[in-house]
Amino acid sequence: MLRLLSLLALALFLAIPASAQTTAPSAPSPGSKPQDATAPTEAKKAKKVLTNDDLSQTNGKISVVGDAKEQPKPKPAARATPATQYIASLRNQLEWLEKQLKDVNKQIIDLKNFNAGEPSTRASGVQLDQRHQREPIEVQIRALEDKKKDLESKIDTLYDEARKRGVEPGDLR
């Protein structure tokens, strides 16, 4: 039923002459300026819009908005130079080390607070994902502080290496 209605609407659309679809130029009103002599007197011919149902009935070529031949070629992505790859690698390493350093600092604060009898900064005091520590808290704190020094020295080494290679400090941020 819907297909029959669409075909009927298409037949009516095709039956209406193109001159009836466009409006005829109106006569100038008495107070307006006369039309320029170089202006075209004929209105442009209306373009026919086709639907998917109409495509099977057409013969010949159909114009499509935009042409693949006329589209600009996509520019290739800028290749990463070894320097930019090195900077990106350094950034990733520094980000990972700084995240670990932040976690170690948080663990040290938690252990010091626990040792002093203060409440923990963690959401819950019970950690189900960690095993029970048999070492005294002071030993655990010293081990974490050693790990903290190790992480800080690795970060400093990466910054020194980057400086020696000529990487600007702002490039690593």
Image (cartoon, rainbow, N blue to C red):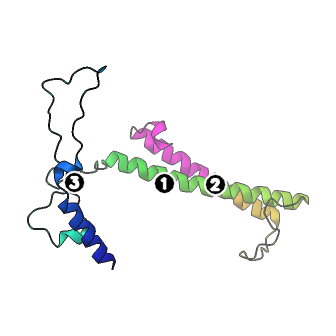
- The tag earlier along the polypeptide, 1 or 3, is 3
Q: Residues within 10 Å of mark 1 (few under 14, many from 20)?
A: few
Find the distance from the CA under tag 3 to the CA under tag 2. Answer: 57 Å
Q: Which mark is residue 92?
A: 1
Q: Which residue was labeled with disc 2?
A: 101
Label 2 sits on a secondary structure element that is helix
Q: Which mark is residue 65?
A: 3
Image-quadrant location for residue 150: bottom right
Are circles 1 and 3 on residues that touch, CB within 8 Å?
Answer: no
Q: Residues within 10 Å of mark 3 (few under 14, many from 20)?
A: few
Whether residue 113 appears in magenta in the rendering, the answer is no
Q: Amino acid at mark 3?
A: Val
Q: Which residues are magenta?
A: 149-173
Q: Nearer the viewer, residue 165 or 81?
A: 81
Whether residue 159 appears in magenta in the rendering, the answer is yes
Q: Position of residue 17 (x, y in %)?
A: 17, 55
Q: Nearer the viewer, mark 2 or mark 1?
A: 1
- The tag earlier along the polypeptide, 3 or 2, is 3
Residue plotted at (21% across, 67% down): 11
Please, which residue is most extreme toward the left here? 60
Looking at the figure, which quarter contains the N terminus?
bottom left
Q: Amino acid at mark 2?
A: Leu
